[in-house]
Image (tube, helix red, strand yellow):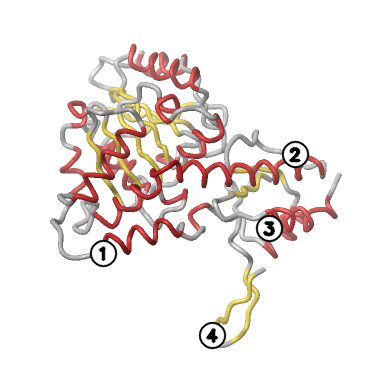
Amino acid sequence: MVVWLVGGIMADVPSHAFASDNAAPAHPAVIDAIVAANNGSVASYGNDPATQRAAEAVKTTFDSPDAEVLFALTGTAANVIALASAVRPWQEILCSDIAHSLVDEAGGPVRLSGAPVTKLRSDNGLIDPAVLDIEVARRGPVHHSQPRIVTITQSTENGRVWTPQAIKDFIDHAHDLDLLVHVDGSRIGNAVAALDISAPDAIADADIVTVGGTKNGMLMGDAILVRRPKSFDGIHFVQKQIGHLASKQRFIAAQFEAMLHDGLWLRTATHANRMATRLSAGFQALGLTLTSPTEANEVFVDLEPAAYAAVSAGYAVHRPDPLLPAVRFVCSWVTTEDEVDGVLELLAPFST
């Protein structure tokens, strides 16, 4: 519980420690990088040294020397730019049944591209490659939208991670079916840290990747790693059209340079994952049921109404589907053991 002064009156406000990793503050190294970039006048719209260095850092991290790198202010914008530049209005975007692009971007990909977004059944965001065969079987007749790109999320919206072999098999199969693949990497750092693998292994042969920064210690900003630029030839125009070609782009880019330096992005992600593991283990010790396995920095647990009310009095938490008992807790780079234990203490009376 946090005490705020609201309208001149002291009021108790639930802590946002587990509401979302978007609620976390920016890392001090990020603030320092912004301050350092705030020195003199430089070229605008990304034509500055900081942006060039950050772009190289992203390419090096993901072993993509021939890629292009764009920066956007938000993860939604990064996804929309990537997907809208891949399709024409008669084509189709495929995604999981819980994809952020489907349920949490207010139809942005559809509005900007004119192409429909079609959901595929999944296991908490992990899609069986065989499902793609069913979708592409509709290709050909003029009466149907033509599947062109599939977007997957690493780690998924329900906290699962694609193992290196699983994501390789999925992307290779998609390419065999002449589908492009987009990886929504809003929490890519958490996936890399959780799997203890290299960044390239976490995305396999994906054609385009959104690299998250906001959820992992940055003030704002996500990068778009365009690994096959010829397949996204209008992407710079889409970025400009939707207002995400920042004139003072160096202040976004400088944050990426700071986070990718010396593995900081993985240290922040590792801490968030460790706190989620602690919270998940605590829930299970209380006899509570996890909705999905805890594999990164998100924990999903079923809570009865009384338990949900009790924890909500102290912490702002999210129930993704108001008709289901699953409640989401998200850990970040600043989550503390005391905060984790505080949640468990509130739920101890509901132990089974």
Q: Nearer the viewer, residue 258 or 340?
A: 258
Q: Nearer the viewer, residue 136 or 10?
A: 10
Q: CA distance from mark 3 to mark 2?
A: 20 Å
| SS assignment at label 4 | loop
Which of pointers 3 and 2 indicates the residue nearer the eye?
3
Horizontal side, residue 6 vs residue 225: left or right: right
Residue under numbered circle 2: 289
Q: Identify which amino acid the numbered label 4 is placed on.
A: Gly
Kindly identify which residue carries mark 1: 38
* Badge 3 vs badge 1, beta-carbon distance below 8 Å: no
Q: Position of residue 107 (x, y in %)?
A: 36, 45
Mark 1 neighbour class, 10 Å CA radius: few under 14, some 14 to 19, many 20 or more? some
Query: Which part of the image, by quadrant, shows the N terminus?
Result: bottom right
Give amino acid for label 2. Thr
Q: Secondary structure at mark 2?
A: loop
The residue beneath circle 4 is 7
Task: Classify residue 69 as left or right of residue 281.
Answer: left
Q: Residue at x 63, y 43 (%)?
A: 274
- Residue 32 image point, x, y percent: 38, 61
Q: Is residue 56 left or right of residue 75?
A: left
- Mark 3–mark 2 CB contact (< 8 Å): no
